[in-house]
Image (cartoon, helix red, strand yellow):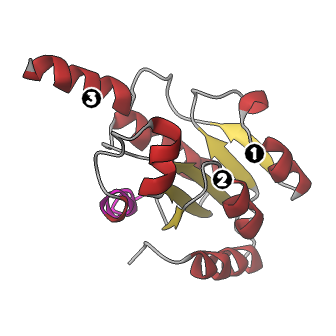
Amino acid sequence: MKVVPLAEAVRAREAARAQGRKVAVANGAFDLLHVGHVRYLKAAKDLTSGGLLVVGVNTDRSVRASKGEDRPVVPERERAEIVAALGCVDLVVLFDETDAATLLSALRPDLHVKGTDYTEGSVPERDVVARLGGRTVIAGDPKDHSTTDVLSRIRRLLR
């Protein structure tokens, strides 16, 4: 299973580094997985040049804290399993914070990859990543897709 506790992901990071492989961390809620998510995660994996991609998936509690009480639509274990099923994803870790600073501090990645709804300067954890010796990078297609938009379209169809 690719959904693992944080301690196991840290061990995988150490093994990858011992082999000279790059480690990247991507993170998000991944509620109602859509093509934008897939393109973002594929691009994140490509940046590792065959290295390790660990994806942090927000817990239900942290999604509610950042997106509101009606989210997530899909429970955390299912979201994690769906993300883990993607071939470009090596490991998935659930994390309970509203930002990824604690996750990044534990994993100490070479790259923290965020989607195109951010700029390198707007990523909240960029200073944490820099202190750890890593880089923050933006990857994926233009932000033309979002779970919020999908939910809005579904609600319109149900009226």
C-alpha distance separating marks 1 and 2: 7 Å
The answer to whether residue 42 of the structure is visible from this angle is no
Q: Position of residue 48 (x, y in %)?
A: 64, 55
- Is residue 47 rendered magenta in the image? no
- Measured in 3D between alpha carbons, the distance from the residue under mark 3 to the one under mark 1, in whole angstroms, is 28 Å
Camera-side residue of 142 and 131:
131
In the image, what residue occupies the spot 83% across and 51% down? 128
Main SS of the magenta part reads helix
Observer-nearest residue: 96 or 130?
96
Among the two numbered marks 2 and 3 on one chain, the one whose residue lies closer to the N terminus: 2
Q: Is residue 19 above or below residue 136?
A: below
Taking the spot 67% from the left edge, 76% from the top edge, the residue there is 10
**Crowdedness near tag 3: few (<14), some (14–19) or many (≥20) residues, C-alpha within 10 Å:** few
The answer to whether 27 is drawn above or below residue 90 in the figure is above
SS at circle 1: loop
Mark 2–mark 3 Cα distance, whole angstroms, equals 25 Å
Residue at which label 2 appears = 100
Residue segment shown in magenta: 78-87
Which residue type carries mark 1? Answer: Glu
Neighbourhood count class around disc 1 (C-alpha, 10 Å): few under 14, some 14–19, many 20 upward:
some
The residue carrying mark 3 is 151
Q: Quadrant of the N terminus?
A: bottom left
Q: Is residue 67 left or right of residue 113?
A: left
- Which three-letter amino acid code belongs to the residue tagged 3? Leu
